[in-house]
Amino acid sequence: MDLPKQENLHLFLLAGQSNMAGRGIIEESDKLPHPRVLALDKDGKWRLAVAPIHFDKTVTGVGLATSFAEAIAKRYPNVTIGLVPAACGGSAISTWEPGGYHSQTKSHPWDDAIARARVAMNNGVLKGILWHQGETDTQNLGLAQSYGQRLAEMVSTLRQALDATNVPFIVGGLGDFLANHPTCVHYGLVNDALQNLNVDRCGFASAAGLGEFDGIHFNSAAMRSLGQRYA
């Protein structure tokens, strides 16, 4: 695939758990690529971005990345967007640190994200890090109470590793439908921590009012809307 000049390929690292990877049902419209939106595949090769963007689990479907990228591409007509998928379904924030291991995907989320970002940065310029994670940590009071501090520390470590001190970090809120989920009992604590994350150059994309299909995952329409909110 022919790539644009390095300065014209704007990269966005996609990190977190299943609601970043996406679990929405893929429809025909999701198979129509935008000519200026690419994704780094499992083998580190660039391809046109069509759902599913992620490959963490076989159930991966529609996520927020495509609608986000298309909105950014529309805003900047002279650049190509390069998506770098690195989310791992079910991963707790404790796995998002150097050497962390996630048994569900048999992977090292933080290390793999860094490695994939560095591959992508050979061809483009990192312009943003998108994060959607926290559902797993809502299930334990101690984890929920320390979530904000741990995420802030992770952001610092991630930026240092990628020499990305000034790169924006965008977090998404948890679905408000989790308030009724039987195991996500500390949803409010984690969502507040996300909304009030104490790091520089950080943005928050609210998930308020968006729908779900199984009580914990956003449906396809919600994913498309959330991507636009990230943008």
Image (tube, rainbow, N blue to C red):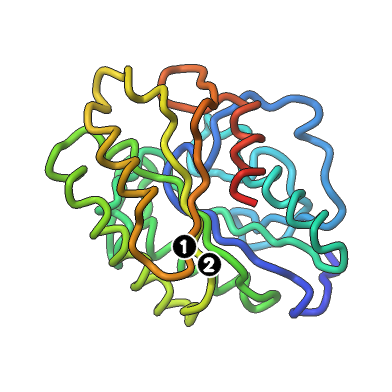
Q: Secondary structure at mark 2?
A: loop
Which amino acid lies under the numbered mark 2 shown in the image of this protein?
Pro
Q: Position of residue 89 (x, y in %)?
A: 42, 40
Residue 78, numbered label = none
Percent position of residue 196, x then y: 35, 53
In this rendering, the answer to whether 62 lies above or below 151 is above
Q: Within 10 angstroms of label 1, few (less than 14), some, or many (20 or more) residues?
A: some
Asked if disc 1 and disc 2 are in contact, CB closer than 8 Å, the reply is yes
Task: Please tell me whether residue 155 is drawn above or below residue 17 in the rendered image.
Answer: below
**Which residue: 82% across, 70% down?**
3
Q: Which numbered disc, 1 or 2, marks the residue that appears first in the sequence?
A: 2
Q: Label 1, label 2: how many angstroms apart (C-alpha)?
A: 6 Å
Q: Quadrant of the N terminus?
A: bottom right
Along the viewing direction, whichever of 28 and 208 lies nearer the viewer: 208
Q: Amino acid at mark 1?
A: Cys
Q: Position of residue 67 (x, y in %)?
A: 70, 43
Seen at 78% across and 52% down, the residue is 48
- Say which mark, if any, is on residue 168: 2
To which quarter of the image does residue 36 belong? bottom right
Residue lying at the far left in this picture: please name it: 142
Residue drawn where x is 59% and y is 49% of the image: 230
Q: Indicate which disc residue 202 carries.
A: 1
Left or right: 153, with 46 as reference point: left
Query: Which class describes the residues within 10 Å of circle 2: few (<14), some (14-19), or many (20+)?
Result: some
